[in-house]
Amino acid sequence: MSNVKLDLVIYLGDPDANAPTMPISQAAAKADELKSKLSFSEGVYGAIEIKKNNKVLGELKPDPAIGLITQFIKAIPFLIDGEPEQASLSESDFRFALEPQGDDVLISFFEGDFAEEPEDFLIEPELFPLEGLANQVIVAAEGLLSLIKSLEPELLQNDDYILSLIDVLDAAKKSFRDHKLRNERGVRR
């Protein structure tokens, strides 16, 4: 069992005003309490939080929550196929590098255009089990969609960013399910 964990945290207000954060699993469970604080139609910010031994690594960098988790979900099928990916923040020059290493993924968070030449690491490369990473990213995306459904269900039908998240989540879940079945049956690609 890995001691590295990934989660999506949601800002309960403006991140520039030092709004507090809440893990997506807690936010989804407390949706009724959060109706006055969150509006996805106006924009909700989130951050990817990586913990090792229950200690947060690096500094959280806010970004629009839907686009941020979509970047990670899009990476899952590629990582399963052994291809490196990056998840870029849309409002800054920060990126997560995701590099397959057998049954693991090396994950780092840096400023700059290329993982090979980062300007500054916020999180030095950490080894993360591929299946653990895929599962935690899928759970985070499902939690975000659950929160949206509780707060603004109409957006699940008419918001292009949310519809895109739903599509890539379905593809990632299928890819992950196929990967697990291949591993259970001992089938190699």
Image (cartoon, helix red, strand yellow):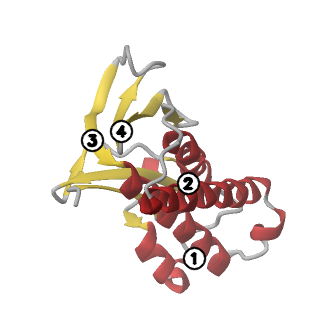
Q: Label 1: which residue?
A: 36
Select label 3 or label 1 by which is in front. 3
Q: Label 2: which residue?
A: 65
Residue 99 left/right relative to 163: left
Select label 4 or label 2 by which is in front. 4
- Which element carries disc 3, helix, strand or loop? strand
Amino acid at the residue labelled 2: Ala
- Which element carries disc 4, helix, strand or loop? loop
Amino acid at the residue labelled 1: Ser
Gap in angstroms between the C-alphas marked 3 and 1: 39 Å
Amino acid at the residue labelled 4: Gly
Whether label 3 touches label 1, CB < 8 Å: no
Whether label 2 touches label 3, CB < 8 Å: no
Out of 181 and 187, give the one closest to the viewer: 187
Q: Label 4: which residue?
A: 102
Counting from the top left corner in percent of width and height, residue 49 is at 35, 52
- Going from N to C along the chain, the mark reached first, 3 or 1, is 1
The residue positioned 46% from the left and 61% from the top of the image is: 185
Q: Label 3: which residue?
A: 127
Instruction: Check the picture and name the quadrant holding the N terminus.
Output: bottom left
Residue 118: quadrant of the picture: top left
Query: Considering only vertical position in the picture, is 100 above or below 149?
Result: above
- Going from N to C along the chain, the mark reached first, 1 or 4, is 1
Q: Residues within 10 Å of mark 3 (few under 14, many from 20)?
A: some
Gap in angstroms between the C-alphas marked 3 and 4: 11 Å
Query: Considering only vertical position in the picture, is 188 above or below 151?
Result: above
- Which element carries disc 1, helix, strand or loop? loop
Q: Residue furthest right?
A: 158
